[in-house]
Image (cartoon, rainbow, N blue to C red):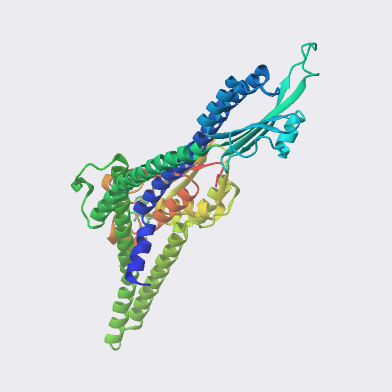
Amino acid sequence: MKKSQIKMLSFIKSFRFRAFFIVALLVIVPVLTSSSFIYHMSVDAYIDKKIDRFKVNNTMLKNSIVSEGYLDENNDSQVVETQIAQLSGEYNCRIQIINSQYVVVSDTETGETGKTSISENVIRSIDGENVFIENKDEYYVEFAEPLVIADPTSDNNKNSNIIGAVYIHYSMEDVISYKDTLERYVIIADILLIIFAFVAAWLCSVLFNRPIKKMHQSIRRITLGQTENEKHGKETLEVTEISEEFSRLVEKMKTQDKSRQEFVSNVSHELKTPLTSMKVLAESLIGNQGVPEELYQEFLQDICKEIDRENEIITDLLDLVKMEKTDVEINISSVNINEILETVLKRLKPIAESKNIELVFESFRPVIADVDELKFASVATNLVENAIKYNNTDGTVTVSLNSDHQYFYLKVIDTGIGIAEEDQEHVFERFFRVDKARARQTGGTGLGLAITKDIVLKHHGSIKIHSKEGEGTTFIVRIPLKYIA
Ligand code: ADP
């Protein structure tokens, strides 16, 4: 495709052209339709008025012919003659008066006076019919009407005598000149209106396009990194709102991108740490010849621990990625929450006992709720595991379960080390650990609470934390009893 063709095509596709085209069409079509309608109506009305007036004159002529006895022998009534001359002069029409023997008594056009009329219309009218023919295409009308003498002895006109007929051929040439004049006016008016329509369409297209152009500029400014405060001019409310919304979207995307980058670098770092440890341990074994057997054992055990840790991180990462998928399937079913919690506590009891930590389960009422059994069990496990992990020896972990008509509440309360105020809002972030050095000993990945929160949110629930450093931590999970997808 040629450059000019591409330009043309993009112009046709532009909003400005479309606005111009639509407005022009909206003005021009009704204007042309109505002007053509008005034109035809005026011509018809003009013709109808002419014919009506003519009919009145014609009736007067007929009355005079009858009353003056114009068709009687040797009667050449001046009154009738004058009337005929006036009517034919004024309307430029041909008038014939025919007697009952079909003989033309008078004709305004020479040639037929005294001759017998063989016109079909005349014959029909002498038979008593009022003939009226209107030809609007060729602009003429024909009248052939009987001349009737009323019988004075009769109550009605049933026995009236037809003494002849009047035949008139009225060629409405003046209508043609009226039509031509009207046509000229209509064309001039149409041209003026079309010009007006184009100007209005152009103005509208410019006006409609202005906010879009401004929006484009505004978005470009935002894309170039300028903040919305730097925008100038008198943007319309909609443009300001859209640019502000766009600005917010860009900010959100920037934040998401930043957190994605942080996540990737955290993942790499976390995955590299056990590998580095393993390499150091392996290298020191390779580099030192004749190392005692016990040291080999110890180093290999350390390598195994690092492999377990790597495995743990990868498993947690996979869980997290799975949970973050928007279309992740959760297998909701009606589940006995008390039973799940009892099972979890039973499983974790040996770990708690190893630290001499007491595990207490307080159930205020039996709770049946719509949850994904496995995922909810992992929430409870994570929270209770943490409560044990970050607890002091001889401490207590209390798990309490309660519900109202809408939600059930799981509280995991420990008497452990607690979390500093400033760290509390970060504990749900991926890879966040309050004490990284300690985490290496306790074996945490920093992903447990992030996964827990994701699962709770997938159940349309919420998770809150209350903690005081040195005193202990409480996690409160609230989940709806009925799951609504
Ligand atoms: P981790 O695998 O490190 O336990 P989590 O995401 O479960 O990862 O927890 C994140 C951090 O929050 C932990 O490293 C710990 O510092 C802190 N934390 C979580 N639960 C508790 C708790 N019950 N008491 C004190 N600190 C806690």
Is residue 412 shown to the viewer in this render?
Answer: no
Q: Is residue 244 left or right of residue 160?
A: left
Q: Residue at x 76, y 11 (%)?
A: 152
Is residue 135 shown to the viewer in this render?
Answer: yes
Q: Quadrant of the N terminus?
A: bottom left
Foreground pick, 472 / 80 = 80
Which image quadrant for residue 158? Answer: top right
Q: Residue at x 55, y 31 (%)?
A: 88
Q: Residue at x 33, y 51 (%)?
A: 249
- Percent position of residue 91, x then y: 53, 31
- As drawn, the residue found furthest toward the bottom would be 289
Which image quadrant for residue 48? Answer: top right
Which image quadrant for residue 121? Answer: top right
- Percent position of residue 209, x then y: 31, 49
Residue 323 against residue 410 in the figure, above or below: below
Residue 460 against residue 293 in the figure, above or below: above
- Percent position of residue 156, x then y: 78, 14
- As drawn, the residue found furthest toward the front would be 74
- Percent position of residue 475, x then y: 41, 45
Foreground pick, 292 / 34 = 34
Q: Is residue 453 left or right of residue 166?
A: left
Count of marks placed on residues: 0
Foreground pick, 44 / 163 = 163
Q: Is residue 269 left or right of residue 118?
A: left
Residue 459 against residue 175 in the figure, above or below: below
